[in-house]
Image (tube, grey):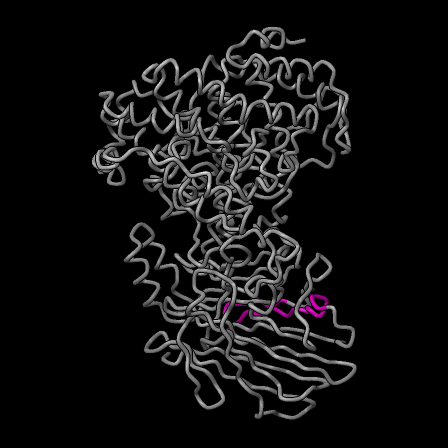
């Protein structure tokens, strides 16, 4: 048995935690029911596992890997410099984002730190509301971060009482887990597990403890030790060794895996005194972070949406850089070909700079985080212009500041440029700064007009960027096939987004405000999550179904400089037995500045059919056509309907609002082209053309 296991039962204040850890490592026999690898070996960190060690083999593999990692670890580690390293903090305090921190905290100190009321926590279990608690929780988090920054900038001890007041509020919280993730109220009642919030809280608090050191009182430091053991280290250890508490995200493949492992791993590498303990945690983190890779398609697409790419892959990068620094460059989690493709997603997903397709549970305002893009540009040596070093915006967490707060990470020089020698210039294998982005595995196509690259020079100034995009002629579009069992799935096979001069004539409304129903069996009751709220047809009165089998098939792609087209068969997205054929063809013309969407449907017997356009832009009828917007940004939708071999003009345009709660609910409208009678075959073609070319 490693020496640290023999000593751990004597550690204070976590004696019981140490006893559990020692006991389960020695007598561990539980099999998690997954395929196992060779005993004593872990899969290398640069592979995606087909087999994952389990049971006794996992126990032996982690111990063996930990022994190999031990020499890489120093006596202590923190992602941020200590408060005593004045050069870093004094330079940071002069950055525009941080100049008003001290003034802001001085004002906040006039009122006590607000405890997050338990009544707000219980609202989720009572009525499904999660927003009220999370807003209060986030405000307090931001206040703590500001107080720590203020003290590090000023270095006079004036803000230490405020920081300790914040820390004690954390210590007194009945749960660090969000109420939406504590449905049984186990955490609220003292039976702790780990979620997105608690793992990040653990890392943040561990970082604060390391940065401030003995500037904090002895009582606070000892209580911090105890709280991190109870709420982070014990649950993780016992889950890995026994399967309890149930931490599904350890083997999950969505954003939770990277976010939670980053929090737990960062906290352990920062706070645990024993190298042996840190090596064991690192071995476990290094193993299970590989699951996160599986959540991305083979071409690097993130089906969870742009916001969750920033969150999930952003934490993947935070973890990787933390581990790289903690092991003196020995462990490089991001050193994987697939993760390079996932990194490129952030540079290629925007329809135009400042606008991303809000597919899945994504805000319509979500864009890739600029500081993350700058870091990835340096790390992989992409050598892309306009993605230079960018400080995180004031308000990002302290751990992110530790990674993104320096122009180049320690020991990563301009000469080495990360992995540029290994991966080469990005333009040699895929130019992300192009008119077309195609993710074949995910069936996502993004098309941009000529001249759009000029807007990239405005990335650092949001007002100038918005003006440049608003003045850019031509249409930019995004469309998707895919299937209806994606991460943070919407039933949206075949939908599309159009951008013209900064307005969105047709779009995806993104995610709703999360409630208890959002992630329940009743998820698709929501008219913004089911297919009714997307730019896809209602077929024979039926919406699309949920499941991987309800999918599109790419029948044809034709890409060239003048015109791009994508033809999908998406009849399988609907469970309609009478439907013999349902195709959608997208045609994008740069020469004629137009974008058409044509559906063709065939039935065994006459059925109803309607095709919607979803918008948040003002609109008006123009004969049998529709004009979205006004002035230079106006776009005309020319509608052509044929049924049973004849052109049809007696179709109707039905306008509806939405019931679900989401950001643009008041302005969102669904305009449905409704055929008057059931038909055996029909085609509906919508051609979007700028009113002023």
Count up the numbered dots: 0
The residue shown at (69%, 69%) is 569
The quadrant in which the C terminus is found is: bottom left
Question: Looking at the image, which is closer to me, 118 or 57?
Answer: 118
The residue shown at (55%, 68%) is 533
Please indicate whether residue 642 sits to the left or right of residue 628 in the image: right
Residue 568 within the magenta-colored segment of the rendering: yes
Q: Residue 452: horizontal and vertical position, in percent? A: 39, 62
Q: Residue 435: horizontal and vertical position, in percent? A: 47, 62
Quick check: can you spot residue 147?
yes
Question: Looking at the image, which is closer to me, 516 or 577?
Answer: 516
Q: Residue 659: horizontal and vertical position, in percent? A: 52, 67
The residue shown at (60%, 44%) is 254
Q: Is residue 2 above or below residue 376?
A: above
The residue shown at (35%, 59%) is 455
Q: Quadrant of residue 454?
A: bottom left
Question: Looking at the image, which is closer to me, 197 or 79?
Answer: 197
Residue 145 within the magenta-colored segment of the rendering: no
Q: Quadrant of residue 665?
A: bottom left
Q: Residue 40: horizontal and vertical position, in percent? A: 72, 19
Question: Looking at the image, which is closer to me, 471 or 244?
Answer: 244
The quadrant in which the N terminus is found is: top right
Please indicate whether residue 249 sits to the left or right of residue 151 in the image: right
Quick check: can you spot residue 389?
no
User: What residue span does the magenta drawing correspond to?
Assistant: 557-574
């Amino acid at each position: 048995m490693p020496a640290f296991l023999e000593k751990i039962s004597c550690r204070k204040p976590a004696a019981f935690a140490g006893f559990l850890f020692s006991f389960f490592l020695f007598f561990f026999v539980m099999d998690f029911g997954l395929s196992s690898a060779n005993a004593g070996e872990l899969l290398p960190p640069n592979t995606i596992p087909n087999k994952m060690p389990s049971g006794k083999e996992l126990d032996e593999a982690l111990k063996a890997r930990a022994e190999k990692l031990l020499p890489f670890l120093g006596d202590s580690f923190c992602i941020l410099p200590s408060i005593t390293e004045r050069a870093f903090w004094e330079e940071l305090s002069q950055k525009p984002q941080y100049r008003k921190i001290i003034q802001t905290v001085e004002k906040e100190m006039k009122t006590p730190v607000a405890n997050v009321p338990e009544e707000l926590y219980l609202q989720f279990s009572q009525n499904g509301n999660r927003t009220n608690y999370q807003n209060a929780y986030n405000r307090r988090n931001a206040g703590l971060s500001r107080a720590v920054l203020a003290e590090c900038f000023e270095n006079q001890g004036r803000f230490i009482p405020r920081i300790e007041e914040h820390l004690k509020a954390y210590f007194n919280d009945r749960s660090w887990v969000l109420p939406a993730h504590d449905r049984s109220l186990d955490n609220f009642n003292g039976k702790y597990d780990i979620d997105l919030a608690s793992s990040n809280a653990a890392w943040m608090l561990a970082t604060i403890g390391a940065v401030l050191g003995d500037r904090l009182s002895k009582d606070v430091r000892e209580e911090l030790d105890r709280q991190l053991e109870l709420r982070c280290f014990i649950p993780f250890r016992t889950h890995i060794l026994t399967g309890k508490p149930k931490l599904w995200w350890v083997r999950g493949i969505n954003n939770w895996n990277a976010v939670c492992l980053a929090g737990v791993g960062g906290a352990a590498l920062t706070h645990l005194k024993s190298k042996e303990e840190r090596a064991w945690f690192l071995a476990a983190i290094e193993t299970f972070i590989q699951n996160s890779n599986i959540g991305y398609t083979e071409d690097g697409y993130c089906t969870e949406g742009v916001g969750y790419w920033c969150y999930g892959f952003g934490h993947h990068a935070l973890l990787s850089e933390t581990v790289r620094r903690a092991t003196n460059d020995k462990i490089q989690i991001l050193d994987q070909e697939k993760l390079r493709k996932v990194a490129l997603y952030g540079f290629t997903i925007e329809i135009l700079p400042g606008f991303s397709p809000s597919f899945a549970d994504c805000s319509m305002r979500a864009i890739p985080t600029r500081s993350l893009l700058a870091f990835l540009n340096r790390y992989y040596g992409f050598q892309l212009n306009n993605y230079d070093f960018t400080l995180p915006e004031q308000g990002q967490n302290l751990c992110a500041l530790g990674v993104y707060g320096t122009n180049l990470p320690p020991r990563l020089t301009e000469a080495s440029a990360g992995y540029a020698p290994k991966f080469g210039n990005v333009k040699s294998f895929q130019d992300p700064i192009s008119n077309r982005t195609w993710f074949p595995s995910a069936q996502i196509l993004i098309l941009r007009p000529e001249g759009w690259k000029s807007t990239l020079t405005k990335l650092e100034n949001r007002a100038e960027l918005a003006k440049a995009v608003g003045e850019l002629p031509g249409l930019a579009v995004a469309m998707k096939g895919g299937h209806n069992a994606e991460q943070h799935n919407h039933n949206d096979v075949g939908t599309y987004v159009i951008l013209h001069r900064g307005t969105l004539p047709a779009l995806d409304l993104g995610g709703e405000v999360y409630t208890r129903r959002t992630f329940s069996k009743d998820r698709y009751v929501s008219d913004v999550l089911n297919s009714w709220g997307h730019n896809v047809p209602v077929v024979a009165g039926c919406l699309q179904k949920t499941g991987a089998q309800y999918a599109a098939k790419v029948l044809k792609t034709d890409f060239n400089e003048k015109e791009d087209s994508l033809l999908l068969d998406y009849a399988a997205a609907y469970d309609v037995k009478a439907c013999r054929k349902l195709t959608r063809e997208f045609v994008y013309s740069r020469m004629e500045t137009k974008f058409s969407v044509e559906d063709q449907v065939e039935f065994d017997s006459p059925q109803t059919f309607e095709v919607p356009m979803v918008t948040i832009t003002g609109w008006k009828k123009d004969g049998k056509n529709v004009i979205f917007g006004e002035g230079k940004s106006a776009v005309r939708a020319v509608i052509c309907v044929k049924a049973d071999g004849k052109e049809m003009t007696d179709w109707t345009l039905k306008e509806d609002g939405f019931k679900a709660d989401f950001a643009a609910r008041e302005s969102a409208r669904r305009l449905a082209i409704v055929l008057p009678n059931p038909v055996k075959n029909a085609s509906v073609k919508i051609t979007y053309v700028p009113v002023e070319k």
